[in-house]
Amino acid sequence: MAVINIDEAKKNVEQVGFLDIDVDVELDLFKEIERLKKEKNAVVLAHYYQDADIQDVADYIGDSLGLAQQAEKTTADIIVFAGVHFMAETAKILNPDKKVLLPDLKAGCSLSDSAPPHLFKKFKEQYPDHIVISYINCSAGIKALSDIICTSSNARQIVESLPKDQKIIFAPDKNLGAFINKQSGREMVLWDGACMVHEIFSREKITRLKLRHPDAKVIAHPECEDPVLKLADYIGSTTQLLKFTKSDPSRAFIVATETGILHQMQKDSPEKQFIPAPPDNSCACNDCPHMKLNTLEKLYLCMEYESPELVMDEELRKEAFKPIRRMLDISAQLGL
Ligand code: 13P
Ligand code: SF4
């Protein structure tokens, strides 16, 4: 690896979001990352949408709920978060004494970006008697304006933990919110946000794919739009989708979520076939461009130089902590 001045390189992080250093191609990054984990007492948490190499080197792979639970209970000194910004931020909010590293600070989220806190604050003021439930895919600013956080694996239970006549604003994902409204019979007010990856699936192309694979089950993430969800045999969070493919006897699945999850599905059930649901154009838009900003090289560099680090304002952290705590407590009571 090139000899570098780390202080200069860290200044560079502010511009590009990651350490821009050439990594020696001869270096065995898997070995190096294992060495750094031990030397620094670091834990690598990865979301299912990360590259296969990153998933293979992670200590824990999970959905947003599982990752938050792991981040809260880890005894490691450093949490290396292979995911996107709101996930690493949630880890810092829950476990502020740990150093939290994100391989690329610019790994954002279109859904989170669809809810700027200053606009959401005004929106909320129109509904003074409503409780705010926010999907974890949002900034700390939105969390601080919320009463309870939820994830795709506990959204229904969180909503149903409130009295039936309780008025609710659900933010920022209108597709997940509409899905929960349908399931629970509620009429939550929905913020108009969505995920760019899950809105891209084509109902027509999935229908045609089903004709070619009549025995394949369609499985979908609830961030997808209603017409796609209507085609699904099973709807769930990434962890729930993965569990379903393991336990269901079908030999083939059409998977309507980000393609990273296919790596674990194929690993867990090598005898089954997993077909990514096609987007409504010819690009590879069912790859999340934010998640895919993280690479094995950036993961290695951020561990070696302990940068970029996720830092946050303590007052904001404390406010954002309360609704996440409430979610974790309800989830623990329900055994989720
Ligand atoms: P889950 O991890 O809850 O399945 O959500 C998927 C997602 O879009 C994360 O960004
Ligand atoms: Fe955000 Fe969608 Fe990417 Fe998840 S898949 S990080 S919700 S843009």
Image: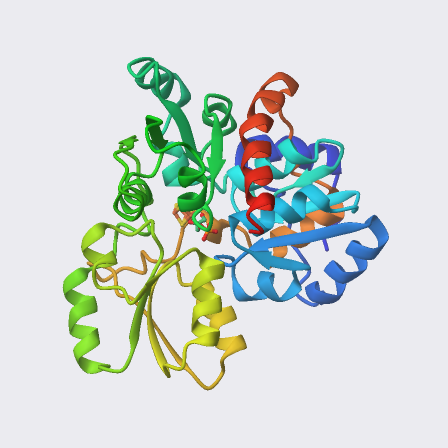
In percent of the image, x 49 and y 68: which residue is there? 243
Please give left or right for residue 140 compared with residue 127 in the image: right
Coloring scheme used? rainbow
Q: Quadrant of the N terminus?
A: bottom right
Q: Looking at this view, is 97 or 240 the one in front? A: 240
In percent of the image, x 65 and y 35: which residue is there? 94
Q: Quadrant of residue 158?
A: top left
Q: Residue 194, percent across and down?
A: 31, 41
Q: Looking at this view, is 121 or 28 the one in front? A: 121
Q: Residue 272, percent across and down?
A: 42, 83
Q: How many marks?
A: 0
Q: Residue 270, percent across and down?
A: 49, 83
In percent of the image, x 80 and y 60: which residue is there? 35
Residue 222 sits above or below residue 312 on the image: below
Residue 83 sits above or below residue 327 on the image: below
Outermost residue toward the right in this view: 39
Please give left or right for residue 300 compared with residue 48 in the image: right
Please give left or right for residue 308 compared with residue 112 in the image: right
Residue 166 sits above or below residue 156 on the image: above
Q: Looking at this view, is 101 or 68 the one in front? A: 68
| Any part of residue 250 in sight | yes
| Any part of residue 310 in sight | no
Q: Quadrant of residue 228?
A: bottom left
Q: Residue 104, percent across and down?
A: 56, 43
Residue 111 sits above or below residue 22 on the image: above
In percent of the image, x 78 and y 55: which residue is there? 37
Outermost residue toward the bottom in this view: 271
